[in-house]
Amino acid sequence: MDEPSSSVQVNQLEWRERFLKEIVQNENIKSSHFNVLTKDKYSDLILQVEEAEKAQIKTPLHQRRLKRFAILNIGSVKKLVARSEDNIKYYIPAEELYDVIDAAHRAVGHGGRDRLLAETSLKYANVTKQMINLYLSMCVTCQEKKTKKKRGLVSKPILHSEMNSRCQFIKLLLNCYMFRDTPIPLSSKIVGNVR
Ligand SMILES: [Zn+2]
């Protein structure tokens, strides 16, 4: 059943918050080297790269920034992009990562982790496998698909054993009719099994 769109929107807002909180927390525990950039950090890096480009004498920090990043001017907006790639790959501020992954996930028709990673790595420099796994754990449609698959696997052995006990009962009845002298063992246990 489809949820009303307003509650889906509320969930989306909650997940975006949760997603951001988790990636920032993980970043604080273990730095991912510029994959998680809060908006402040992102603006700060743009300033650092611009300064490095202008500097007459490049310090080691300038060199490191220039080796990794470049600035792309789109109108009056400055975007941080990866320097070494052939095609332009954007760094996305942490606050926008959820929406970027969400749009890509819908574009590939709720495709799985590898498909989604292939899609995002065409355009973005800082979407990681961990972020995608985290996002997928929050996608209701994908989680429902997973649960249905699991249920399908469990139901098979139950059906199989039910069939087995029915077959055994029919075999037993046939045996009894074939050897009339033997009393028919209709114990309560067997009758109970058939019901
Ligand atoms: Zn999905």
Image (cartoon, rainbow, N blue to C red):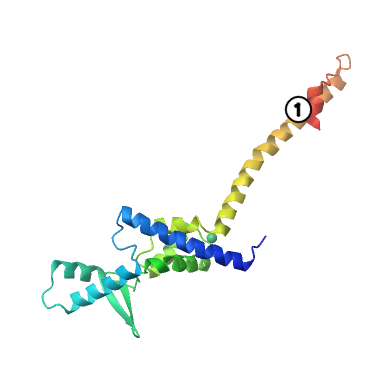
Tell which residue pokes out farthest to the right in this image. 180
Name the residue beneath numbered marker 1: 168
* Above or below, comparing residue 57 to residue 131 in the picture: below
- Asked whether the viewer can see residue 83, the reply is no
Tell which of 188 and 174 is nearer to you: 188
**SS state under label 1:** helix
- In the rendered image, which quarter contains the N terminus? bottom right
Q: Residue at x 60, y 64 (%)?
A: 7
> Which residue is located at x 31 percent, y 79 percent?
72
Q: Can you say whether 27 is above or below 158 in the image? A: below
Identify the residue shown where x is 22% and y is 73%: 48
Q: Residues within 10 Å of mark 1 (few under 14, many from 20)?
A: few
Q: Give the answer, above or below, for where 75 lies relative to 24.
A: below
> Percent from the top left, x then y, of residue 116?
46, 62
- Which of the four quarters of the rendered structure image does ligand 1 lie in? bottom right
Image quadrant occupied by the C terminus: top right
The image position of residue 98, as x and y in percent, is 45, 65
Q: Indicate the amino acid at tag 1.
A: Gln
Which of the 4 image quarters holds residue 176? top right
Left-right relation of 104 to 87:
right
Residue lying farthest top? 181
The tally of labels here is 1
Nearer-the-camera pick, 151 or 95 = 95
Nearest the eye: 6 or 179: 6
| Residue 53 appears in the figure | yes
In the figure, is residue 46 to the left or right of 132? left
